[in-house]
Every structure is written in structure tokens, then in C-alpha cells.
């Protein structure tokens, strides 16, 4: 069977853009078991409470929920186990330096298949304050209103 091409989205962390100022983004491979891959291929995953850490020169994805494979046997995986992320040494060192600064964390943005390999996109992020979140909502509402007005003008012509 030929290998699939392109990018297939599985899960996104939509609240990340609302809760954090997103900085540098990285694409990382994931070390998975067979039943985890099968569950991901069914499009089942959640990044709601997930985060990443750098421990002893390795990057780990923690608290990501990949449900058990429905047709798995006693070899099924734990749903919220810690998963190792695969990055280059230079990228890991850079992440370690960036996260070492106060107020920064690693946030997973999405899980997807890229040319048949399971990948996760992580970003260095800083938390937003309440007034930042209100500004984000205000900007989003203004953009929505301007798009609505432009669409209305196009219909009038």
C-alpha cells in the first residue's frame, strides 16, 4: 500500500490562541504505540489540558488524551500517558533556554499526520492576562463586523 501524502489534521488546541501569546512554533514527531496510532487514524484525540516539558534533555508531551482503540486487546495503551517528542538536539537546547525564562511554557497546538507520520505542533507561549483576552475578543468581533459589512456591500452590487 502506498504511503499517504499531505497533511491530515486530527486535533487542535483552539483555546491556546485565546489563552496564550504564541511564539516560536516547532514540529515534532511522537513516539506512539500501535493502538495509539490506530486511535489517531480514527480522528480521536484531545489537547484540552495538554502541555509539554523539557526534562533531562528530552521533550515530553503530558496529559494529551488519546482514547483507547475500540478493537484493542489487553495491549491497549493508557489514555493520558506521557509521550516522548522527537526533535533535533539544537531545537531541544533552544526550547530549554526559551522555557527557562520566567512565564514561558510549551503548548501543543495540533496533532496531525504528515506524510503518514504522526506529528505534534508545539509552541513557546506566554500566558495572557484578563485584559489581553478582552482585547482579543474585541479584535475578533471587529474583524467579524468588517467581514460582514464587506459581504453585504458585495451582495448590493
Image (spheres, helix red, strand yellow):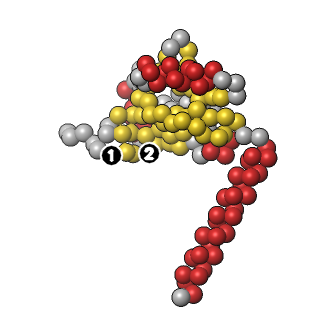
Contact, mark 1 vs mark 2 (Cβ under 8 Å):
no
The residue located at (53%, 88%) in the rendering is 157
Instruction: Give the percent coordinates (x, y) of residue 35.
Output: 40, 28
Q: Residue furthest top?
A: 56
The residue located at (63%, 76%) in the rendering is 149
The residue located at (50%, 14%) in the rendering is 57
Q: Is residue 84 visible?
A: yes
Instruction: Give the percent coordinates (x, y) of residue 93.
Output: 50, 19
**Quadrant in the rendering for residue 118:** top left
Instruction: Give the percent coordinates (x, y) of residue 62.
Output: 57, 25
**Given this view, does label 1 or label 2 mark the residue nearer the observer?**
1
- How many numbered tags mark residues here? 2
Q: Is residue 44 visible?
A: no
Q: Quadrant of the N terminus?
A: top left
Residue 156 horizontal side relative to residue 145, left or right: left
Q: Which mark is residue 9?
A: 2
Q: Which mark is residue 6?
A: 1
Near-viewer residue (116 or 45) = 116
Q: CA distance from mark 1 to mark 2?
A: 10 Å
Q: Residue furthest left?
A: 1
Within-10-Å neighbours for mark 1: few <14, some 14–19, many 20+: few
Instruction: Give the percent coordinates (x, y) of residue 38.
Output: 38, 34
Near-viewer residue (103 or 16) = 103
Amino acid at each position: 500500500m502506498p504511503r499517504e501524502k499531505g497533511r491530515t489534521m486530527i486535533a487542535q488546541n483552539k483555546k491556546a490562541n485565546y489563552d496564550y501569546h504564541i511564539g516560536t512554533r516547532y514540529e515534532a514527531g511522537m513516539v506512539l504505540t500501535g493502538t495509539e496510532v490506530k486511535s489517531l487514524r480514527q480522528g480521536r484525540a484531545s489537547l484540552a489540558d495538554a502541555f509539554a516539558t523539557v526534562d533531562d534533555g528530552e521533550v515530553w508531551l503530558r496529559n494529551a488524551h488519546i482514547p483507547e482503540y475500540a478493537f484493542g486487546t489487553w495491549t491497549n495503551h493508557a489514555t493520558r500517558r506521557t509521550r516522548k517528542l522527537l526533535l533535533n538536539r539544537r531545537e531541544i537546547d533552544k526550547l530549554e533556554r526559551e522555557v527557562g525564562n520566567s512565564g514561558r511554557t510549551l503548548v501543543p497546538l495540533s496533532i496531525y499526520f504528515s506524510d503518514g507520520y504522526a506529528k505534534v505542533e508545539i509552541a513557546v507561549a506566554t500566558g495572557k492576562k484578563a485584559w489581553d483576552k478582552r482585547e482579543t475578543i474585541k479584535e475578533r468581533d471587529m474583524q467579524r463586523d468588517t467581514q460582514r459589512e464587506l459581504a453585504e456591500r458585495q451582495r448590493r452590487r
